[in-house]
Image (cartoon, helix red, strand yellow):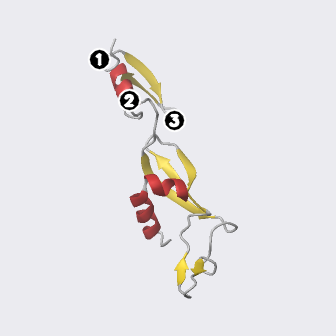
Amino acid sequence: GNPLLDTAGYVVEYYDGSTEVLAANIIAEAIFSQVDEEGRDFLLLDEIVDHERDENEALTNSNCWEVKKNGNKIRIPTTKGWRFRVRWKNGTSCWLPLKDLKESYPLEIIQYATGHRLL
């Protein structure tokens, strides 16, 4: 049958150990909302909660400039050495490199960086 029409109850255990009885159709909706048309899963960002800079990799104000042939100094565009701790809507969290986050969550990165005076 169609899982979206199934109202049988199931005990669900959450990450924090608490349990709740949910109908099969509610569980199916939650699962389907986390996958695309081809069945690949994805995570929804809740918030960026922390950041860190690798002193050995990230450029500093003294070495982040490139001098062009005409003498103009241009800032080197790089995300190397920065990573952010993110919390997902499902309650999990992890550290991700800025190079990966900036493509998927550009506005959130800008808001976080501005709020933490990283720019």
Q: Position of residue 18 (x, y in %)?
A: 48, 31
Name the amino acid type tagged 1. Answer: Leu
The answer to whether residue 29 is left or right of residue 89 is left
Q: Which residue is drawn at 41% across and 35% down?
A: 34
Q: What residue type is labelled 2?
A: Phe
In this rendering, position of residue 107 left or right of residue 66: left
Left or right: 28 with respect to 118?
A: left
Q: Quadrant where the N terminus lies? A: top left
Residue 32 at x, y percent in the picture: 38, 29
Counting residues from the N terminus, which is met first, the one under dot 1 or under dot 2?
A: 1
Q: Earlier in the sequence, mark 2 or mark 3?
A: 3
Query: Which mark, residue 15?
Result: 3
Compare residues 19 and 22 and report the one nearer the observer: 22
Quadrant in the picture for residue 69: bottom right
Calculate the distance from the C-alpha at mark 1 to the C-alpha at mark 3. Answer: 26 Å
Tag shown at residue 5: 1
Question: Could you say where residue 37 lies in the image, as x and y percent from the top left?
Answer: 38, 31
The disc labelled 3 sits on which kind of residue?
A: Tyr
Q: Which residue is drawn at 49% across and 49% down?
A: 87
